[in-house]
């Protein structure tokens, strides 16, 4: 999750006074921000510093990251006619070259110590930002589209999926060793809408990326994170992803039963458990590991970190994962 986040003083130092997306466009800054947490903690992997909203930008939309407000679109999509404002054909090698450069530089600088994960937002999550114009609690403007303009919604989701496929294939060519797809706004949809407007695109992306990589003799694991999509666990485990990443509202044992060994699972400690004293963090981690078991499992949080979280407690989380997993493996 958001390991390179705002909870580290050294992160805030690099970010200070700079525009967020200017930082994303600087491969040197992205590389440094990706490496920072690895210097502090014995993580097993790293995720490239970037953002999911670089895709709407590549499609021609203007997005700014405003302090205290988050992502803000200058001119969100209002009606289906507005789709004509988007670039019909996106040359990802031109528009998102800065991300590929950041990945290549970071991959070199990591020197093989841990794998580097690339990522993207999924079509529905990006669509909702492009219509809402920023963060939202109800996502009612975007959902209004789904109910009133289903054809245009599918047209937009398809356009996004096409760009995402090129973008992910490009990330692997640049050096990414695993890919995570964030459907952060899955939970705002019910099962019926999820099956129509999210799941088919998640599947399509995994299948097309894998086919394209295969042609080049490449293969990387893919991870899907559909936040709050409890109802879709079984379907997600049959969607061509090797790993299903879970938020903290799902019980580890029931997730195992429902996915039945078809995929590896990732997650899912409540990030807010990092506010607890260290001993309690260790306890929460132990229970989580006992629930998931040690095979086919990637210990992680169930979502991103908040800026006021104590780096020491992040360290306590990582230590607890290592300590308890060693014990559990020994007991077998
Ligand atoms: O931590 C990292 O640096 C890893 C890189 C990373 C990732 C994987 C960032 C940097 N953003 C993301 C993904 C991302 N961005 C998601 C999917 C994961 C999730 O569900 O959180 C989403 C929804 C976004 C959109 C976004 N970007 C938001 C959420 C706004 C909302 O709707 O409430 C915010 C606040 C950002 C800004 C951002 N992106 C990344 C960081 C470190 C930040 C904080 C801003 C800053 O550093 O100035």
Image: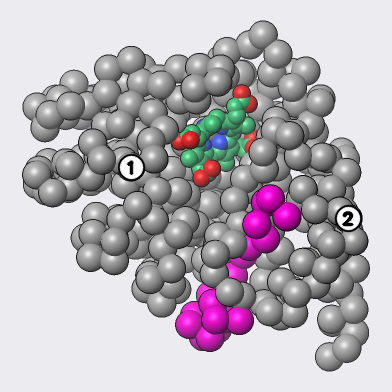
* Residue drawn at point x = 71 percent, y = 71 percent: 288
Q: CA distance from mark 1 to mark 2?
A: 35 Å
Q: Quadrant of ligand 1?
A: top right
* Residue drawn at point x = 82 percent, y = 40 percent: 310
Q: Is residue 170 left or right of residue 104?
A: left
Instruction: List the residue tagged with mark 2.
Output: 278
- When asked about the image quadrant of residue 327, the answer is bottom right
Q: In the image, which disc is placed on residue 14? A: none
As for residue 283 lying within the magenta part, the answer is no
Can residue 103 be seen here?
Answer: no
Q: Determine whether the residue tagged by mark 2 lies in a helix, strand or loop.
A: helix
Residue 171 at x, y = what percent? 52, 41
Q: Is residue 124 above or below residue 294?
A: above
Q: Is residue 28 above or below residue 126?
A: above
Q: Which residues are magenta?
A: 253-273
Instruction: List the residue tagged with mark 1.
Output: 138
Judging depth in this view, the residue of 170 and 39 nearest the camera is 39
Q: Is residue 81 above or below residue 306?
A: above
């Amino acid at each position: 999750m958001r390991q390179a986040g705002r909870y580290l003083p050294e992160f805030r130092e690099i970010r200070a006074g700079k525009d967020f997306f200017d930082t994303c466009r600087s491969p040197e800054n992205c590389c440094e921000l990706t490496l920072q947490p690895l210097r502090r903690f014995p993580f097993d992997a790293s995720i490239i510093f970037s953002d999911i909203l670089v895709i709407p930008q590549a499609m021609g939309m203007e997005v700014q990251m405003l302090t205290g407000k988050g992502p803000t679109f200058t001119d969100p999509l209002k009606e289906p006619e507005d789709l004509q404002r988007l670039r019909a054909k996106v040359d990802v090698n031109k528009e998102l070259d800065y991300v590929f450069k950041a990945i290549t530089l970071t991959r070199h600088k990591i020197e093989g110590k841990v794998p580097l994960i690339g990522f993207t937002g999924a079509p529905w999550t990006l669509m909702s930002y492009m219509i809402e114009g920023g963060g939202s609690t109800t996502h009612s403007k975007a959902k209004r589209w789904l109910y009133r303009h289903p054809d245009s919604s599918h047209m937009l989701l398809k356009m996004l999926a096409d760009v995402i496929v090129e973008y992910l294939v490009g990330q692997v060519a640049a050096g990414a060793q695993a890919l995570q797809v964030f459907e952060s706004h899955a939970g705002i949809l019910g099962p019926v809408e999820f099956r129509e407007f999210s799941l088919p695109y998640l599947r399509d992306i995994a299948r097309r990326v894998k086919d394209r990589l295969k042609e080049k003799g490449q293969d990387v694991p893919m991870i899907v994170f559909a936040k709050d999509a409890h109802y879709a666990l079984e379907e997600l485990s049959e969607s061509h992803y090797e790993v299903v990443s879970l938020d903290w509202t799902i019980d580890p044992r029931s997730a195992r039963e429902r996915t039945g060994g078809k995929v590896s699972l990732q997650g899912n400690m409540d990030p807010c458990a990092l506010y607890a004293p260290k001993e309690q963090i260790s306890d929460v981690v132990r229970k989580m590991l006992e629930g998931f078991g040690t095979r086919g499992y990637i210990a992680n949080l169930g979502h991103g970190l908040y800026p006021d979280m104590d780096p020491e407690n992040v360290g306590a989380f990582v230590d607890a994962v290592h300590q308890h997993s060693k014990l559990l493996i020994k007991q077998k």
